[in-house]
Amino acid sequence: MSYHKIGSPLFFNPDFVISCSQWCAHFIDPLGEADHLIVSPILRSALRESASLLDSQALLPTDVLIVNPHGRKNSQAMAELIASKPASLRYRVLEGGWGDSFSTFIPHLKSTVPAVEQTVDFCRYVENMAAAYKASRLVFFPSLIEGYGMTGVEPMYCGTAVVASSYPAILEAVGDGALTLCPYRSSAQQWRQAVDQVLADVTHWQNKARLRTQQLDARQTQQLQTLSDYFIEIAR
């Protein structure tokens, strides 16, 4: 019953378990009772290729892209970043697919930045996420809870710099390709400084992001080979 309470698939007594990160694996199988493989979410050149396509919404270039301003994604840090210097940078906030985050985020932001709609491009939906990343100089991803952190990794495949939290699963994803801060300890000023630091040397961080994607591609090849070898072994 303990596995049921923590939402572990081991409650169903599977033959093996595949997790998206080492961090998740700690919680799914804390006692190490099942064959466990790690296969990070698969990312390949298709994302890079789609980034070169023209978005049907013709997104204008922006400095900072923020995705899914939900509480678990650290919407407070997102709002504080915009409120700290609302007119100095161009922002785009994409609602994301997890609930109506705009219903609370926009009123909260309006209470501190009266002219926020003149400063921030609020988007409920974009057809091509790669194009949204490509149109941004930086993606701000201060999330508090993640199983992996795709919003931190996907921009890197589009050559976009990232500022992210140092949540363990996110670090597995972004490595040293992003500037990271602890989401539970960093102040609004520290997040602001991190964003300013990256934008002041954005080419350097874009290069680090590209290098990280090469490392992720190599890791992905190894993980998929391990998975293939495992299936061949159990089929014998």
Image: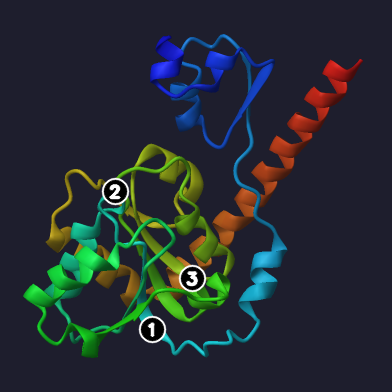
Residue at position x 49%, y 69% from top?
Answer: 206
Depth order, front residue of 65/121: 121
Q: Distance between the residues labelled 3 and 1?
A: 12 Å
Residue 92: which quarter of the image? bottom left
Determine whether, in the image, residue 202 is placed left or right of residue 44.
Answer: left
Task: Please state which amino acid type lies under the numbered disc 2.
Answer: Arg
- Name the spot of residue 100 as percent of width and height, x first: 32, 62
Task: Please state which amino acid type lies under the numbered disc 1.
Answer: Thr
State whether residue 186 is above or below residue 88. Answer: above
Other residues around mark 3 within 10 Å, as few (<14) / some (14–19) / many (≥20): many
- Name the spot of residue 87 as percent of width and height, x first: 18, 87
**Residue named by callout 3:** 160
Quadrant (top left/top right/bottom left/bottom right) for the C terminus:
top right
The earlier-in-sequence mark between 2 and 1 is 1
State whether residue 143 is above or below residue 222. Answer: below
Residue at position x 65%, y 82% from top?
Answer: 53
Other residues around mark 2 within 10 Å, as few (<14) / some (14–19) / many (≥20): few
Residue at position x 67%, y 19% from top?
Answer: 16
- Answer whether labels 3 and 1 touch (C-beta < 8 Å): no
Residue 189: which quarter of the image? bottom left
**Residue named by callout 1:** 62
Residue 114: which quarter of the image? bottom left
Q: Seen from this angle, which residue lies furthest right?
A: 236
Q: Is there any visible trace of residue 27 in the rendered image?
A: yes
Task: Please state which amino acid type lies under the numbered disc 3.
Answer: Thr
Q: How far apart are marks 2 and 1 (CA)?
A: 24 Å
- Name the spot of residue 94 as percent of width and height, x first: 38, 71
